[in-house]
Image (tube, rainbow, N blue to C red):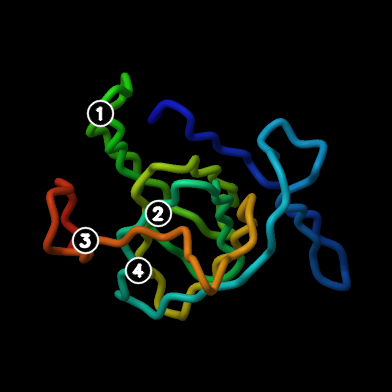
Amino acid sequence: MIDGVKVKKLKIIPDDRGMLMEILRCDDEIFKSFGQVYMTTAKPGVVKAWHYHKIQDDNFACVHGKIRLVLYDARIRSATYKEINEFILSLEEPILVHIPKLFYHGFKGISDCEAIVINTPTKPYSHKDPDEFRLDPHDNAIPYDWRK
């Protein structure tokens, strides 16, 4: 596991009306602060990558479909420099992945349906000065092939 990345197993509580799943609580060890909650989607086979943040951490959970979330540690002084972590996020084995700032990350929709991802970052998005630093998903120095 890349140094600083944390995973929380999520529990689905079903009943005859449907289900409930707590994703992130302020009393979780993984919780740092609240910025906002947003939903993003990925159609089957679509890659949404690469980017990192200098200020915020992300907390990803997939609530419909399935994604492959990939993290890359580009921090030169890190003990896990150049390491890659892959996670499969879905309701089949629900997890929340805490992605610290300065980690490149992205995901690919790998289900037959459009995947829905909930992110609870530690800072709100700034439309005037976005905390996002992007690379092309395929043309970059990160040793990862999204075609798999």
Disc 2 and disc 4 in contact, CB within 8 angstroms? no
The disc label shown at residue 123, or none: none
Q: Position of residue 134 (x, y in %)?
A: 30, 62
Percent x, y for residue 6?
54, 34
Which residue extends farthest front?
Answer: 128
- The mark closer to the camera, 1 or 4, is 1
Q: Amino acid at mark 1?
A: Ile
Dot 1 or dot 2, earlier in sequence = 2
Instruction: Return the mark for residue 146.
Output: 3
- Of label 2 and label 4, which has the lower sequence position? 4
Q: Would residue 55 be found to the left or right of residue 3 on screen? A: right
Q: Sort mark 3 into few (<14), some (14-19) or many (20+) by Cα contacts within 10 Å.
A: some
Image: 20 above or below 22: below
Amino acid beneath label 2: Leu
Which residue is the site of mark 1?
76
Distance between mark 2 and mark 3 Cα atoms? 10 Å
Label 2 sits on residue: 69
First in residue order: circle 1 vs circle 3: 1
Q: Nearer the viewer, residue 94 or 130?
A: 130
Residue 107 in percent (x, y) is at 37, 61
Residue positioned 68% across, 64% down in the render: 37
Q: Would you identify the image quadrant in which residue 32 lies?
A: top right
